[in-house]
Amino acid sequence: MLPWLAMLPLLLAAMTWAVRRALLPVRALSEEIAARGADELRPVAAAQAPGELRPLVAAMNGLFSRIEATLARERRFTADAAHELRTPLAVLRAQWDVVRRAEAGAARDAAEAKLGLGMERLDRLVTQLLALSRLEDGSAAIQRQPVSWPAVVEQAMGDCLPLAARRRIELACEGLDGGPQAPLPLQGDADLLTVLLRNLIDNAVRYAPAGSTVLLRFGERSLEVENDAAPLSDAQLARLGERFYRLEGQDEIGSGLGLSIVQRIAALHGMTVRFARRDDGRGLRVTVGT
């Protein structure tokens, strides 16, 4: 027993040294991550890590990449929102000054009407920004259920009727006649699809000439919304769907976010959005399909 007892301290020391040496990469990795700032999301070098730690390092690098993409998206969204909110707030401030100085009568009524339009534009912009933010960060829950398109169309068109009536636009729908082939069979969220369809119809009504028709057409694998607006150039068609992009020379209130929301909801349902002119070369046709 005496030789064993004499060797025991040496064995314990050797085991302690071996364990510490084996854990040096873990300690170095911990120190490197602890020394980083909150915005330092560069990948961790996996070549120097032991083989047992490389799956962990790869998973951490994937997490850093996703966090960096999320932060970049949030910074871009915040910058865009701040830029877009600056204009309506400045307009509201100027309109409020006009209302304060205007005397009772026609001038004050006109100033109050302009102030009301400015408030409506700001309300629409904030609503669209919140909707786009929920869709982009994934907080909008997707409930996969068979979609009843007649109910979705009724709700979406009902929401757009006041604007259509003011602009004398007729809303028409084709393809929901209850034929043997169900139009665009889809498992999805009816509330989000109502938002999608409402934004499409609202956009078509706002850009359509007064007294014209906006047509919603269902097919077996897609739906289309088209109007009779002036033909768009190829450059304008290419920019449709960009956030905050609006065609110049428009009098109607808008935020330039409606089609972005449409694209995001379509992507969540596995569909794509295509923009094109009608067959006769006029207007705009938006096709959403699988």
Image (tube, rainbow, N blue to C red):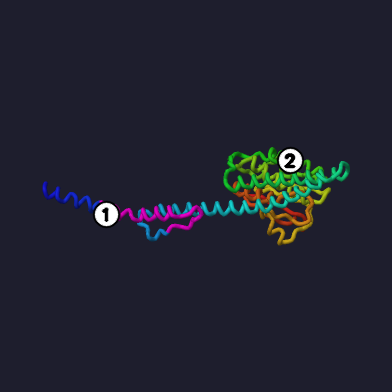
- The magenta-colored residue range is 16-44
Q: Secondary structure at mark 2?
A: helix
Tag shown at residue 107: none
Residue 120 placement (x, y as % from top left): 75, 44
> Image quadrant of residue 158?
top right
Residue at (64% x, 50% y) in the render? 263
- Disc 1 or 2, which lies upstream in sequence? 1
Residue 30 covered by magenta stretch: yes
Residue 37 covered by magenta stretch: yes
Residue type, label 1: Ala
* Total count of labels: 2
| Circle 1 residues within 10 Å: few <14, some 14–19, many ≥20 | few
Residue 59 placement (x, y as % from top left): 44, 52
Residue type, label 2: Asp
Overall secondary structure of the magenta section: helix
| Circle 2 residues within 10 Å: few <14, some 14–19, many ≥20 | some
